[in-house]
């Protein structure tokens, strides 16, 4: 009698049918990203790639600006040459009179 009393459980503690006990709870460390994303090497590599991308973008923008500046200088040189030609022409006409 004592043996059956110890082995039997009260109905309040009985498990539902089909219950399979879990091996153990698996707790996360609270981070949603993976371990690789949190490593320092990955962060440094990502920053280096971003820096390279930005440097290339800045080089392209600088090349465009240099081309625009050269075009402006060429236009200015052409206008100065035209101005000098007109100034010479006006000076020659003034001498004739």
Image (cartoon, grey):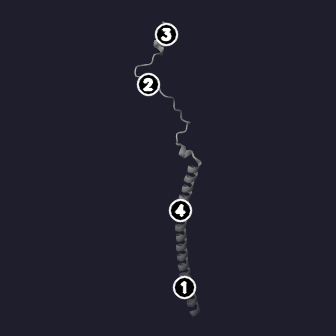
> Quick check: marks 2 and 1 in contact, CB under 8 Å?
no
> Dot 4 surroundings within 10 Å: few (below 14), some, or many (20 or more)?
few
Q: What is the distance, in whole Å, between disc 1 and disc 3 at their CAs?
A: 124 Å
> Quick check: marks 4 and 2 in contact, CB under 8 Å?
no
76 vs 44, nearest the viewer: 44
| Element at label 3 | helix
Q: Label 3: which residue?
A: 3
Q: Residue at x 55, y 50 (%)?
A: 42
Relative height, residue 66 to residue 85 (above, below): above
- Residue 86 found in image quarter: bottom right
Q: Earlier in the sequence, mark 4 or mark 2?
A: 2
Relative height, residue 47 to residue 78 (above, below): above
> Quick check: marks 3 and 2 in contact, CB under 8 Å?
no
Nearer to us of marks 3 and 4 is 3
- Image coordinates of residue 59 in percent, x first then y, are 54, 64
| Element at label 1 | helix
Relative height, residue 10 to residue 30 (above, below): above
Q: Residue at x 52, y 32 (%)?
A: 26
Relative height, residue 47 to residue 93 (above, below): above
| Element at label 4 | helix
Q: Earlier in the sequence, mark 1 or mark 3?
A: 3
Q: Residue at x 53, y 77 (%)?
A: 74
> Dot 3 surroundings within 10 Å: few (below 14), some, or many (20 or more)?
few
Q: Label 1: which residue?
A: 85
- Image coordinates of residue 7 in percent, x first then y, are 48, 13
- Image coordinates of residue 64 in percent, x first then y, are 52, 67
> Quick check: marks 1 and 3 in contact, CB under 8 Å?
no
Q: Earlier in the sequence, mark 3 or mark 2?
A: 3
Q: Left or right: where does residue 49 sit relative to residue 15?
A: right
Q: Earlier in the sequence, mark 3 or mark 4?
A: 3
Q: Label 2: which residue?
A: 20
| Element at label 2 | loop
């Amino acid at each position: 009698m004592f043996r059956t009393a110890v082995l039997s459980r009260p109905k309040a503690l009985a498990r539902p049918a089909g219950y399979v006990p879990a091996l153990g709870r698996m707790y996360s460390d609270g981070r949603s990203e993976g371990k690789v994303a949190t490593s320092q090497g990955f962060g440094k590599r990502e920053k280096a790639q971003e820096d390279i991308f930005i440097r290339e973008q800045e080089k392209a923008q600088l090349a465009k600006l240099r081309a625009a500046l050269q075009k402006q200088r060429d236009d200015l040189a052409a206008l100065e040459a035209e101005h000098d030609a007109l100034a010479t022409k006006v000076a020659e006409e003034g001498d004739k009179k």
